[in-house]
Image: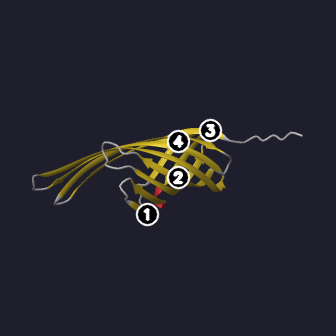
Amino acid sequence: MSLCFIASAQVYVGGSISGAVKNSSNADVKQNSWSFNVQPAVGYLLNDNWAIGGRISYSLSKSKTERVGYDYQSTSNSNVVVINPYAAYSPLRSGNFALWAEFGLRFAPKMHSSDYAIYGAYIVPALTYDLNDHFVLKSNLGFASLSVTGTSEGGFSFSGSAGEKSDLSIGVLYKF
């Protein structure tokens, strides 16, 4: 007697690119900032409801603050790399749409623009839309997430987002 098991799994690649520019001022302070983020991803669909994968995210940001009427100016630059393995479960599908819960870990090693490493865990809902058999649109709904974060210097925080519209990302995945 022989037993054969064939997994209906698929490898996928993709990611997202984002950027933002913000200029604001009032009677006392003038602020200008910009940021850029790229997140390539690779994963493995175990079945219709489970996926495992990982991302390496790179973010670059710069900001400048000036006090109006004073000789004061502050600038900051940040380069961050984040390693992000995750597992995702889809409890709900309707047509081409699927709702996912992504459970992941984050690790940002100490870099020249920071004094400490950052590590953490999170859960974030995501929504996918299958364009066809190979292409998928994916949106992480970070405005409804929970996370626990720590630093190599002993800092610790627990946070939840509710309604932060800037915590929304849209990317494209390709399933082989």
Which amino acid type is marked by label 1? Phe
Mark 4 and mark 1 lie on one chain; the one further toward the N terminus is 1
Tag 2's secondary structure? strand
Please provide percent x and percent y for residue 83: 46, 44
Q: Classify mark 2: residues with Cα within 10 Å, few (<14), some (14-19) or many (20+).
A: some
137 or 5: nearer the viewer: 5
Mark 2 and mark 3 lie on one chain; the one further toward the N terminus is 3
30 or 38: nearer the viewer: 38
Which amino acid type is marked by label 3? Val
Spatial CA span between label 1 and label 2: 15 Å
Q: Are marks 1 and 2 in contact (CB under 8 Å)?
A: no
Q: Are marks 4 and 3 in contact (CB under 8 Å)?
A: no
Q: Nearer the viewer, mark 4 or mark 3?
A: 3
Tag 3's secondary structure? strand
Q: Which residue is mark 3?
A: 11
Label annotation for residue 158: 1
Q: Nearer the viewer, mark 2 or mark 4?
A: 2
